[in-house]
Each structure stands twice: as C-alpha cells, then as structure tokens.
Amino acid sequence: MQREYDPRRNGPITRQMSKPAKMAIELPYGRWTCRDGREVLFNRYYVPTWQRRPGEAPTPADPDERVLFEEQDWFWTGGDNAPWRRARTLARCEAALSAWGLPTDMFELSRQRFAAAYVAAHVVPTLRFKYGF
C-alpha cells in the first residue's frame, strides 16, 4: 500500500492533504524515553518528530534515527481512538505538545520542524565553510 505522504522524505504538510494524513504525520502518537533521559515524540508512522533532553528546549528529531529507547508510551492507539475521530484523543495529543512548549496548530508545528531542519542542514554548514567556525 502506498502512502500519500512519506514523512521521511517530503516537506511540511499541505492543506490539500486529508485531515487524517496531516494528523498522523504531525501529532504525537507516542513518546520514547532513552537511558540518558532524552525523550522523543514519534508520529503514527513511528518516525521521530521532536526530542528534548532534561532541562533543554525541544528540537526537531532526526527522522531517520533509530531511537534506542528504554520506555515507550502511547497517546492513542489508532482505529476508533484516532484523533481525527475522537476529541478526547486530539486533546491528549495537544496537551502533550503544549507540555513540551510546542504549538498545537499542525501547520505551525510542521513549519517549525522543517524550518529548523533546513537551517541545520543547509545554513549552518554554509556559515561554517564561509567563516570557519
């Protein structure tokens, strides 16, 4: 089965995408906790989206990283409990984002994640090359 969106290779979500597709990509499906205390939010495709270390602000996670976690928690379980079907599930996902200091608007969340990834991948290396730091 082919997905309408590949969360590892495509850019930010678009308005033309279906509501379930947008929610599956940007809303947290669960959280991994690593041995060093790092927490990683992952989406419905089990792709890491955001991470934070103890005492630090969240940053976009590497979508290709295979996270070695000690603990795994879910905010929802799929099927009839999906956030596009249940307001309570959507509220739970938004509460998780708010607790991390992240926006609950999916388009803003997507924009921030991809903007930070672009800066890290393109702008910082250019500055390092140009100015030697």
Image (cartoon, rainbow, N blue to C red):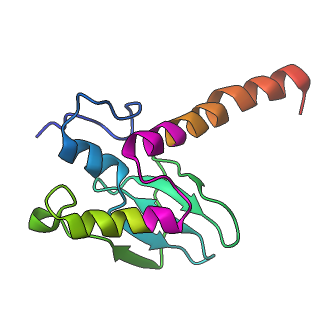
Q: Is residue 133 magenta?
A: no
As drawn, 69 above or below 51: below
Residue at the limit of the structure toward the top, as seen here: 130
- Relative image position of residue 3 (x, y in whole percent): 19, 38
Position of 85 with respect to 15 (left or right) is left
Q: Which one is nearer the viewer's eye here, 63 or 49?
A: 49
- Relative image position of residue 67 (x, y in whole percent): 48, 62
Q: Which one is nearer the viewer's eye here, 25 or 87?
A: 87
- Relative image position of residue 123 (x, y in whole percent): 70, 27
As drawn, 38 above or below 48: below
Q: Is residue 99 magenta?
A: yes
- Image quadrant for the C terminus? top right
Q: What residue is shown at x 65% (from left), y 26% (from top)?
A: 122
Q: What residue is shown at x 53% (from left), y 52% (from top)?
A: 61
- Relative image position of residue 45 (x, y in whole percent): 29, 53
Q: What residue is shown at x 56% (from left), y 34% (from top)?
A: 115
Position of 26 with respect to 120 (left or right) is left
Q: What residue is shown at x 21% (from left), y 64% (from top)?
A: 87
Examine the residues drawn in magenta and state their main secondary structure. Answer: helix
The span shown in magenta is 96-112
- Image quadrant for the N terminus? top left
Q: Which one is nearer the viewer's eye here, 83 or 119?
A: 83
Residue at the limit of the structure toward the right, as seen here: 132
